[in-house]
Amino acid sequence: MKDNIKKIIEYGIYLLVFILPLQTRWIFSPGEFNGGYSEYFTYSLYGFDILLFILIGLEGTSIIINKKDKTIKAPVLWILLGIFEFICFISIFFALDRTLAVFVYVRLLFVFGFFFVIIKSKYDKNKIFLSFIASAFFQSLFVVWQFVTQSGFANKWLGLAKHDPAELGVSVVEAVGASGHSERWLRAYGSLDHPNMLGGFLALALILIMFYRIKQNKKVHLFFIFAYVVIGFALVFSFSRSAWLGLLLGLLIIALISIKRRALQAQKIIAQSILMISVIFFALFLIYPNLFMTRVSADSRLENISKEERISAIDTAQKISQEYSAIGTGIGNYTKAQAEIKKLQYSYKLQPVHNVFLLIRSETGIFGILVFLVILLYYLQIIIKSKENIYLIGGFILILIIFMFDHWLWSLHFGLMLLAFISGGVIKLIYSKEF
């Protein structure tokens, strides 16, 4: 009985990690604002959550049956997470929309549940890593097809939405083609809600592949080289500047650490990784120079609109933070406050500020953001102290960049679950002697 439960949990985790990017869900209450759809007012249940709920229950049952709980000794982290969760809970009572705040808080509990499962359960670190890379690899195959065909089909069972570059609202790169006319090129979404989410996911996969190769310290299987190349192509096709920048800085920091430590084998692997990514970017630049120049120069019509909207969003976030200084708007209620302050009339303009720090500050108040920052410093400290796993700093830098230039790691289901998986995996890797 005990062994059966453990096996179900173990392989359930591998499956959970593999299906992480799938957005299959039941929308039981579509969000609406002035007659238009809003994702941030939508109530839905993901297929991922159902499996996660089962695994949480099984893990709890396993602990009861075994009558022992080998908790990883990280008391400071448990205290910080407990305080942050309590602040999020308290924010419900001051929220503009308490029903929405309760729903988002329950989602946060599922996130903590995933974190708990990743830390507490027994599984093979190589297999869980392979599950994550396999997920990114198959996602990348779909992404390459999506960009080459410039289309995306809808499928409710796979959580896929149709994307047509000719339609307004679809994320595209608008550039002048060889004919001299303006062209709209679809930025690859994969199965996710936005190309920036795809880019962050794939950039993280590339850093983890490199970290895995360094940890193994032996000749790597050709699959990893092939996966690295395919994921690299897919990352480019997302045209996510935050993911590009995060990957670049992450790789540079890792390279500097390897040089300082005089780790020749690590230097070789890092150099190979940087070379492969550079070749991919350069080759695609030769094929699509107009698209790259548009994204880098940021002076096209759409890029200017995006830049103005981001600046305006930061200004709005600062106003919200001032108005709801101590307690915040309530978890998940940023867009409610945004609609009131800016007197918005169109649902597509309801967007969280593209900065996780400002978003958490606005929703949970000054105490929430302070605790969140302390948690980040805690992770930075334990990664630096863990000499064996110090190359995880590259992933930390990538996530930090995404925090600064986007919101999906806090505002959307996939982002929160990805964050739970990575943060739980780091704790497991550093503190667990059995892992």
Image: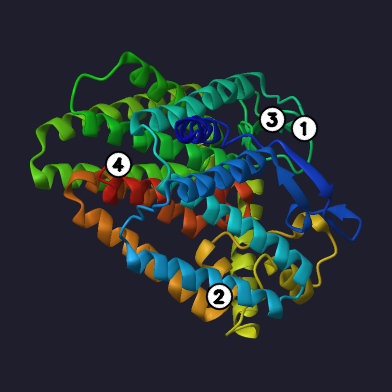
Q: Secondary structure at mark 3?
A: loop
Residue 112's place in the image compared with 313, above or below, is: above
Q: x, y percentage for residue 306?
A: 63, 53
Q: Is residue 199 left or right of residue 263?
A: right
Q: x, y percentage for residue 296?
A: 48, 43
Q: Give the quarter of the image for residue 389.
A: top left
Q: Is residue 183 visible?
A: yes
Query: From the viewer's perspective, is the residue at label 1 or at label 2 nearer?
Result: 2
Q: Which residue is mark 3?
A: 181
Q: Which residue is mark 2?
A: 87
Q: Which residue is mark 1?
A: 166
Query: From the viewer's perspective, is the residue at label 1 or at label 4 nearer?
Result: 4
What residue do we see at 43% from left, 38% from top? 203
- Of the residues shown, which amino acid type is indicated by label 1? Ala
- Of the residues shown, which amino acid type is indicated by label 4? Leu
Q: Secondary structure at mark 1?
A: loop
- Of the residues shown, which amino acid type is indicated by label 2? Ile
**Which comes sooner in the sequence, label 3 or label 1?**
1
**Which comes sooner in the sequence, label 1 or label 2?**
2
Tag on residue 251?
4
Numbered circles on residues, count: 4
Q: Give the quarter of the image for residue 232.
A: top left
**Which comes sooner in the sequence, label 1 or label 4?**
1
What residue do we see at 53% from left, 37% from top? 239
In whole angstroms, how far apart are the C-alphas of marks 3 and 1?
Answer: 14 Å
In whole angstroms, how far apart are the C-alphas of marks 1 and 4?
Answer: 36 Å
